[in-house]
């Protein structure tokens, strides 16, 4: 199993290109199931989660093609073609779904197109129980019959899905995306109330609209969809990954460096950058992206919330940055019940953190030290990389496969900015 070794204490300087957003790419790929024509997705990131979903889609009957194109600035990006003349299997098996919870995003498209789907329940995961009840209740409100059998969800709508009103009791990104895709091919009007406003949901709505869907209100908390009989192919550019951009911004700040994040945008990251600016980090929009620099960092309080609030997917990373700050910070997690697994590992590197339920009190210091660490999920793992960049001595991060799920060429991007980092195969 690969490990990453980091010798800390070097300032990051230079440029980092931000990849396409993983969390936008996954639902967009699932949307390929909704049409028999080709959906072309440009700027797809090179990640193991994309491979996992590709494997699932292929067994549903999707033909995948991949080509590289030269962008204006000479950078090469990947274009994926997804073509599904027929759905050859309506079953998403446990072996593929358990690897990645986002696999459940095939449920809405399969029922919408075929009137039937059998999708394995994703089960628990490291950051909490994460049920899919909102996805299922939403489909029921659209006329689907739902049964649970031997760990599988069976969803039936033999006459097709009907429009309906779905009121979410709290915000769910995945449920909003699943139901948006289902509603695109349902008969009549669907209203999604208290819908997620995340930029990845808006990106999906933009792509579905290009495919012929009739959607209003994406980006607000009420989305209205007029169902259509069929969707066509389209070509769509995946938005830049705001979580990857935020991660590198926090790594730069922790190392007191100066880096331009090419392709990043401040508009989808206002809350994140406001918190960083409050902590003393300089953030500026440039022609090519966002420039980040820091000479010092002070403590700030952070609370995760649905968009436009501070994203839970950057909570571990900002905690690592704040562990190097002058002063104390309170970091509160409100989205997932068990998302502090990075805390004991950060403490092994000398971080001073006290947990009180959903909040962590972080007392910053300049005295983090390298250690052998491991983490149980993607964002927790990368928070250890951030701490390691700021720490004295060597850190070895185990279970690198978590990082490969969500960060494209992480060690290359950091090494190009002066980090002493290498992947060690064992
Ligand atoms: C997505 C993101 C993930 C991010 C999360 C919150 C993708 C592929 N993943 O995950 O990186 O951390 O949004 O921004 O885009 N819940 C239920 N019942 C449901 C659905 C969700 O109780 O049916 C709960 C979850 O357990 C969690 C909360 O709702 O506590 C929010 O989850 P949700 O927004 O659905 O997260 P995902 O879509 O799984």
Image (cartoon, rainbow, N blue to C red):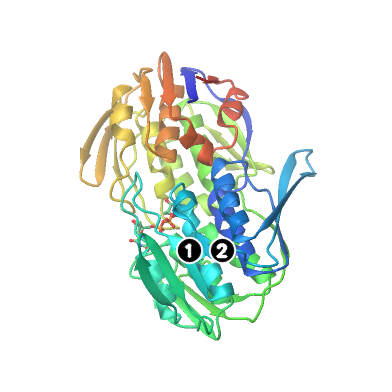
Horizontal and vertical percent position of residue 282: 51, 36
Query: Which secondary structure lies at badge 1?
Result: loop
Tell me which residue sits at (34%, 54%) in the image: 335
Tell me which residue sits at (70%, 69%) in the image: 36
Horizontal and vertical percent position of residue 108: 51, 68
Q: Nearer the viewer, residue 202 or 166?
A: 166
Report which residue position mark 1 lands on.
197
Q: Nearer the viewer, residue 223 or 250?
A: 223
Q: Mark 2 and mark 1 in contact (Cβ < 8 Å)? A: yes
Q: Quadrant of ligand 1?
A: bottom left
Number of residues whose C-alpha sits closer than 10 Å to that of mark 2, classed few (under 14), some (14–19) or many (20 or more): some
Q: Nearer the viewer, residue 199 or 80?
A: 80
Ligand 1 neighbours mark 1 (CB distance < 8 Å): no
Query: Which secondary structure lies at badge 2?
Result: helix
Number of residues whose C-alpha sits closer than 10 Å to that of mark 1, classed few (under 14), some (14–19) or many (20 or more): many
Horizontal and vertical percent position of residue 417: 60, 24
Report which residue position mark 2 lands on.
202
Is 326 positioned to the left or the right of 280 in the image? left
Q: Nearer the viewer, residue 122 or 281?
A: 122
> In the rendered structure, which disc, 1 or 2, sits on the residue that comes first in sequence?
1
Return the residue found at the far left. Answer: 356
49 above or below 386? below
């Amino acid at each position: 199993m690969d490990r990453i070794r980091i010798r800390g204490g070097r300032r990051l300087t230079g440029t980092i290109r931000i990849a396409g957003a993983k969390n936008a790419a996954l639902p967009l790929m699932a949307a390929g199931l909704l049409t028999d024509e080709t959906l072309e997705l440009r700027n797809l990131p090179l990640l193991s989660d994309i491979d996992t979903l590709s494997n699932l889609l292929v067994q549903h009957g999707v033909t995948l093609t991949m080509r590289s194109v030269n962008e204006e600035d000479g950078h090469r990006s990947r274009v994926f073609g997804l073509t599904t003349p027929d759905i050859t299997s309506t079953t998403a098996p446990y072996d593929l779904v358990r690897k990645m919870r986002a696999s459940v995003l095939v449920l809405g498209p399969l029922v919408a197109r075929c009137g039937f789907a059998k999708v394995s329940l994703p089960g628990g995961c490291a950051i909490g129980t994460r049920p899919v009840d909102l996805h299922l209740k939403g489909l029921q409100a659209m006329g689907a019959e739902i049964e649970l059998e031997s760990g599988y969800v069976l969803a039936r709508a033999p006459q097709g899905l009907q429009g309906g009103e779905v009121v979410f009791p709290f915000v769910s990104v995945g449920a909003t995306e699943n139901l948006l895709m289902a509603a695109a091919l349902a008969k009549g009007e669907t209203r999604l109330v208290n819908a997620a406003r995340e930029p990845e949901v808006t990106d999906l709505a933009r792509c579905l609209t290009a495919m012929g869907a009739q959607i209003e209100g994406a980006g607000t908390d009420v989305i209205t969809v007029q169902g259509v009989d069929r969707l066509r192919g389209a070509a769509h550019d995946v938005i830049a990954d705001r979580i990857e951009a935020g991660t590198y911004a926090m790594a730069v700040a922790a190392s007191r460096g100066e880096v331009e994040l090419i392709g990043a945008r401040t508009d989808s990251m206002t809350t994140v950058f406001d918190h960083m600016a409050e902590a003393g980090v300089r953030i500026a929009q440039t022609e090519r992206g966002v420039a980040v620099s820091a000479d010092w960092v002070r403590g700030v309080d952070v609370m995760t919330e649905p968009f436009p609030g501070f994203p839970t997917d950057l909570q571990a990373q900002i905690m690592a940055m704040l562990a190097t700050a002058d002063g104390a910070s309170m970091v509160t997690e409100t989205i997932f019940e068990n998302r502090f697994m990075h805390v004991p590992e950060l403490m092994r590197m000398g971080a001073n953190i006290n947990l009180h339920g959903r909040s962590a009190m972080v007392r910053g210091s300049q005295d983090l030290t390298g250690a052998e660490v491991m983490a149980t999920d993607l964002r927790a793992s990368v928070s250890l990389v951030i701490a390691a960049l700021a720490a004295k001595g060597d850190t070895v991060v185990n279970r690198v496969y978590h990082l490969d799920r969500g960060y494209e060429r992480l060690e290359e991007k950091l090494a190009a900015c002066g980090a002493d980092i290498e992947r060690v195969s064992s």
